Amino acid sequence: MSTSAPAVAAHQLTKTYPGGVTALGGMDLTVAPGTVFGLLGPNGAGKSTTVKILTTLARPDSGTATVAGHDVLRHPGRVRRAIGVVAQKSGSDPVATGRENLQLQGRLYGVHGAMLRRRVGELLERFGLADAADRQVKGYSGGMQRRLDVALGLVHRPTVLFLDEPTTGLDPEARAAMWEEISRLAGDEGLTILLNTHYLEEADRLAERIAIVDRGRVVVEGTPDGLKGELRGDAVHLELGEALGEAGGTLLRPVLDAVSGVHDIQLEGRRISARADDGPAAVPALLAALDGAGVTVAAATVARPSLDDVYLRYAGRRYAEAEAAAEAAGTPGAGGDGPTGPGGERTDDLTTAGGAR
Ligand SMILES: Nc1ncnc2c1ncn2[C@@H]1O[C@H](COP(=O)(O)OP(=O)(O)OP(=O)(O)O)[C@@H](O)[C@H]1O
Ligand SMILES: [Mg+2]
């Protein structure tokens, strides 16, 4: 960890929305300057709410936070000047061109004249938008629009950049291109990036450190490899021929527990997940034990630990399950990012946020 002051520090943030949804239940976060920090969690975990508080767009019910050394509640203006925000929903004006969007954004931040022209040209080039610069944004592909969003967040040279779900909805190719851009940005000028994502792979790939967020708090934090390394051995997943009832699960557990070299066994419906010191050796032993118990197995896989396994261990449920539960509970996938009118959502929000909430 760096000894310099953190770029982002949040302490025990809480937030309950009108209607009683507790979005944050004591969020703690420390991000070292010049690093990419991933906030990873399923839909509805509280990622966007955290970012809204850190970017001064929303107030916490309690708790404190500083960004770039400034207190978000006491000095929101200073925070806003230091940060770039790429909200979960695009804030660009679809009927303006890419260049016009960037110029408008720059002027709103007090960048003018030759300096602005140079900066806009540089960003268009860097984000692969030079050829499309003078076309209306509504004709851009999803990937181009998202790259423009990131460029918009950078016009005024912020020191901390908030990226809220930068690749959601992009096809794999556009996602890969965006990942490359983000990696490159991270290498630049000591920019600190707080990346919100619900893609395990995205956090694994881009973030130096990750906080896994579940139900409004951080359940575990560390480097991707460190987190995976904490899980001993291989992950073994078995898919059963049919779902076990609760009674079946209870009966089966001692049978599984008796298989040597296997631990952390979880039973959920048709799935059995376990850790094994030696996965390939554990599978035949597990199959034999299940066969002896009259349980049929449809599929078996062995894998090195993934962030999904880390999530399962710390949040106590599978990642996909948490996403499905959030969907069933009606959490909007695009997570209510507030007003998104054309012409720069970010700036509208930034200029009104201070007093309004
Ligand atoms: N403006 C709002 N009014 C009421 N409830 C809200 C509002 N914004 C968010 N919530 C709720 O607060 C919880 C946390 O939402 P948040 O958008 O912070 O999650 P998220 O981790 O960003 O999720 P997603 O992956 O869907 O973007 C969810 O249950 C959500 O439905
Ligand atoms: Mg969100």
Image (tube, helix red, strand yellow):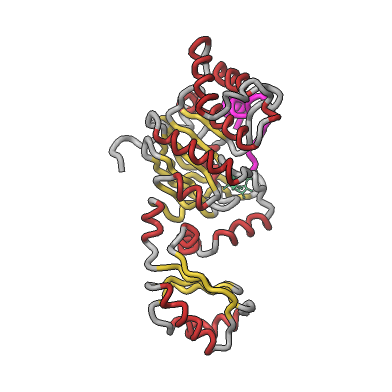
The residue at 51%/70% (across/down) is: 301
Q: Position of residue 217 (x, y in %)?
A: 49, 51
Number of dots carrying numbers: 0
Taking 277 as reference, is 169 above or below it?
Answer: above
Q: Residue 15: x, y in percent?
A: 55, 45
Q: Can I make out residue 355 in this image?
A: no
Q: Residue 9, relative to residue 346: is it above or below? A: below
Q: Nearer the viewer, residue 318 or 21?
A: 318
Q: Is residue 293 above or below residue 19?
A: below
The C terminus, quarter of image? top right
Of the pair 46 and 265, the residue shown nearer to us: 265
Q: Is residue 344 magenta?
A: yes
Residue 214 visible, this angle:
yes
What residue is drawn where x is 58% and y is 35%? 87
The residue positioned 56% from the left and 16% from the top of the image is 107
Q: Quadrant of residue 67?
A: top left
Tell me residue 354's x, y (percent).
56, 27
336 over 316 or under it: above or below:
above
- Taking 9 as reference, is 163 left or right? right
Quadrant in which the N terminus appears: top left
- Image spot of residue 340 (x, y percent): 67, 32
Q: Quadrant of residue 335?
A: top right
Q: Residue most toward the top?
A: 113
Magenta run includes residue 72: no
Extreme front residue here? 131
Front one among 31 and 66: 31
Residue span colored magenta: 335-357
Residue pictured at 51% horizontal, 53% vertical = 200
